[in-house]
Image (cartoon, rainbow, N blue to C red):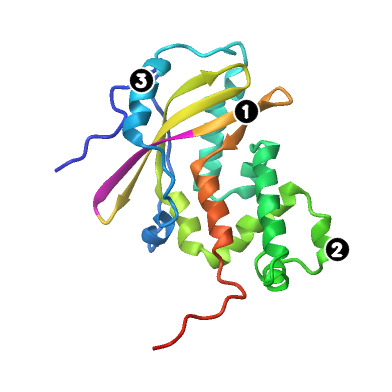
Amino acid sequence: MSRKPLGEGLATATPPAVVHRAGRPGTDWGEAQCVRCFRWSTGALLLSLTAALATPGEGRAQPASQSPEAVAERFFHGLGRLQWTRIVDLLHSDAQDRYRVVAEQLVGSLRGDSILIQLYGGRSREAFDGWTPRETFLRSTTGLVSYARGLMESQVTTDVAIIGTVAEGDSLRHVVYREGTDHMGTEIVEVAVTTLRLQDGRWKIWRNDELDVLEAALRGVPIGRSPPPSG
């Protein structure tokens, strides 16, 4: 039985913008989904946003290429190709700072030296102290390619369709999107939200489920941990 896409019929001024991600064989989809435990309730989301999406948001005078939806499209396009240097420049400084905080916690732990070298590719604590949040994010994603390959490769197996934007005041925009992936012949569809915040006159990605998943994965890398007891 075919599954009707979630979010069908939502009010939106233009057809959903679709960002295609070319899939890769052999992706460990289960690994990628195991940390997706904080997804928004799609039912409540649709009920609360149906009316909001019918109302044009503020700030329409901004060039189309710099609109929240355009920035979100570029973000998902980069994510689908694992283009982290492209992605990091679309992130709000708060989003970059969160990865720096995670790195400081991990490097400051009992397994810190091993994590610094193996996950982040660092050589000394002194050098680590000088990394910017931007560099820390890039080192984080590079490390995850080695320690969570299935999770990273799952980013390229999803198609994203932007549904619309909900304005919250002058500085926040919530871009609602539908993402679908094919898992062994079964279509998996979810509706989610990525939040953008104005920074220096430009919309930047502030909160996003995929970024949260990667952040959680960093905390779960097995570096320096004792193996499980045998038997």
The reply to whether residue 15 is in sight is no
- Based on the picture, tell me whether residue 203 belongs to the magenta stretch: no
Image mark count: 3
C-beta proximity under 8 Å, tags 2 and 3: no
Q: Which residue is mark 3?
A: 50
As measured in the structure, the alpha-carbon distance from the residue carrying label 2 to the one carrying label 3 is 51 Å
Q: Which residues are magenta?
A: 185-193
Image point (35%, 20%), residue name: 50
As measured in the structure, the alpha-carbon distance from the residue carrying label 2 to the one carrying label 1 is 32 Å
Left or right? Give the position of 78 relative to 119.
left
Q: Dot 3: what SS?
A: helix
Q: Which residue is mark 1?
A: 197
Image point (42%, 40%), residue name: 20
Looking at the picture, which amino acid does disc 3 mark? Thr
C-beta proximity under 8 Å, tags 3 and 1: no
Query: Could you classify mark 3 by the number of other residues whose Cα lies within 10 Å: few (under 14), some (14-19), or many (20 or more)?
Result: some
Seen from the viewer's position, the closer of residues 214 and 20 is: 214
Looking at the picture, which amino acid does disc 1 mark? Arg
Residue 126 shows which numbered tag? Answer: 2
Query: Could you classify mark 2 by the number of other residues whose Cα lies within 10 Å: few (under 14), some (14-19), or many (20 or more)?
Result: few
In the rendered image, the quadrant that contains the C terminus is bottom left
Looking at the picture, which amino acid does disc 2 mark? Glu
Q: Dot 1: what SS?
A: strand
Image point (49%, 28%), residue name: 175
